[in-house]
Amino acid sequence: MKHRRWNLAVLAAVALSCVNVSAQSIWQGTYGVTGPLAQNAQGLVVSYDGNNSIAIQPLIGADRFYASNVFGQGTVTANVEAGLAWKQHDWLTGVTQYTAPTAAGEVDMHATWVTAVIGAYDPTQVGSYPYYKLGIAPLTDLNSGAIATSWFNLPAATGDDSAYFNVTPKSFYNGYNYYTAQQTWQHTVYGAFSQQGSADVINSSWGFGDPTATDALTQAADGMARSHPQTTIVFAAGNSTTLSNTANNVGGPASGYNNISVGAVGDFSPTNYTTIAEFSSRGPQDYYDPVHGLIPGVRAPVSIVAPGTTLLSAYYGGQSGGNGPALRGTVVDATSGATNYFSYGLAGTSFAAPIVSGGVSLLDSASYLSLWGPTSRDSRVIKAVLLNSATKLPGWSNGQQTNNSGVVVTTQSLDYLQGAGMINLDHAYDQYLLGTTDVAGQSGGTVASTGWDYASISKDPNPSNTSHNDYVIQSLLKAGTMFDTTLSWFRDLGAPVFTDNANPDLQDLTTTDDGFANLNLELWDASFTHLYAASISPYNDVQELHFTIPADGNYGIRVTYAAQMFGTPQAENYGLAWAVPEPGTLPLLLAAMVGGWMVRSHRRKKRCRESSFCFQRESSASIPC
């Protein structure tokens, strides 16, 4: 991949209203409100439309971790995107900034928003805490990395005033390599436990068109994720869905295999997070490999979804980054130095992704606090747990059908719009901490009805045999019980190789696509003589079953190495999670919000559709806290 200009951009926010608002009217408060945040907001990350507000943390179950004093301690979380978060903001004074070589390192509005959602924290606050000043994982070691070398507009004739940015192979490679391989962090929990290692989480809320995951940047991100499995990489899926672009539009690097790709939930009111946001990118997505070529419409590219409309975050109004004075549509803001302002009405997968990244930080923090080893923080385990514990929203389907043998089968794996469903950290807490927590050895065993495992499987050299790992569930499962199980592994992309050169036109970034194992996930009776359900999608590196137990009895989970899509078979490490979920907390929380103090919800008569890969200058109002 030689040096070139990409049309890359952050995944932007949406205005609450389509009215073109001048900068002066925004900052003087004639757009939106001028008072403090509604006093009945009890949450840490807040959905707020200028009149009503709800707390996002209880909605997604994060309070379960906080009640156990888990706030992200010991973890290192980085937001890598075009620019840097503004660390002068009251909520972000603890942020560590890093500028990749050749990057401009400009402070940026979008980076400030996204970083604050992950882990905003105001250490000067005493007494009763105004919780909207806290991110999802407020005690994580929060970092902000910049990779953009410059920002630009498309030609004026296009009518597009969005801000895009450039990267070089050098800025991209070093921006991610810094947090995975170059730098070593000390993961310390209250001074009593300490480990050295890479960053635990990298969040990135930017993207570009690459539905087949074949762009050099997408493959490089996949290769880094596989080479450094202790770092979970989370990407925003994109905001490309329109009336004329309804599928196959998850952009790179989120379209890759070895990350968590996050879609958005919300309908632009602060009370409803049960529907997929109209702009959120989705499948079915095309598949490509060097042996089979292009196979259209067979991948489920979204891993999970999270709230992504009418959100609130820390404000930056300075004239740098994507808000540079030379860019068309830039906002000149007299209150750019206000350190206690916030922006509200934010929407986009940009803001869903850091909610999930904060959730990853909480899981990893619980691992450190439990004195667990590194396999518990392997990104395949974390992904399996988060997906398996997610709440299936209305309309969820992974295409499960009963075949002629009476076996329930899916060749799709996940839902094309919502992946595994809406993040549910309450269920994830039970899944991760209270059931089977890893199984001795690498080939299955006897397990509780809820839990997870990190294991390995190799393909049997005899083509007529199928190798498998079996898990026998020791407790009786009742008829009518919903049983969920999720399997996650990597596509085998090698570590990216960056060829440096004083001439940027000769810089190169290459990643080998070495192979892809086809692992299957099955549910049997405990003696493994009767097969009930199977997830057998050959094009995804996740398999999932959402299955109603047909009769009282004992059951078993089987992971099989069914085939090799391409490349040389090798031992594949995987994360497996399973659970008999409790009744979902999401509908109960929503009912309480709507039926209680949240009574002033309303819809605008007209609202903007989110633009793909861009800033919208009038996208939020900013008012003092």
Image (cartoon, rainbow, N blue to C red):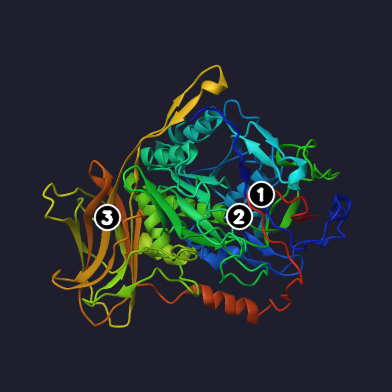
Q: Position of residue 318 (x, y in %)?
A: 77, 40
Q: Which mark is residue 181?
A: none
Q: CA distance from mark 3 to mark 2?
A: 32 Å
Residue placed most toward the observer, 281 or 14: 281
Residue wearing tag 2: 351
Snapshot quadrant of residue 471: bottom left
Whether pointer 1 and pointer 3 mark residues with C-beta atoms closer than 8 Å, the reply is no
Q: Is residue 287 visible?
A: yes
Q: Position of residue 336 (x, y in %)?
A: 80, 43
User: How packed is label 3: few (under 14 Cα within 10 Å), some, or many (20 or more)?
Assistant: many
User: How packed is label 1: few (under 14 Cα within 10 Å), some, or many (20 or more)?
Assistant: many
Q: CA distance from mark 1 to mark 2?
A: 8 Å
Residue wearing tag 1: 113
The tag earlier along the polypeptide, 1 or 2, is 1
Which residue type carries mark 1?
Trp
Is residue 383 toward the left or the right of residue 616 in the image?
left
Q: CA distance from mark 1 to mark 3?
A: 38 Å
Which residue type carries mark 2?
Phe
Query: What residue do we see at 84% from left, 44% from top?
Result: 333
* 598 is higher (above) or lower (below) than 290: below
Residue wearing tag 3: 519
Is residue 94 toward the left or the right of residue 395 in the image?
right
Q: Position of residue 310 (x, y in %)?
A: 68, 62
Which residue type carries mark 3?
Leu
Tag 1's secondary structure?
A: helix
Query: What residue do we see at 26% from left, 59% from top?
Result: 520
Is residue 370 toward the left or the right of residue 22 in the image?
left
Residue placed most toward the observer, 391 or 610: 610
Mark 3 or mark 2, whichever is nearer to me = 3
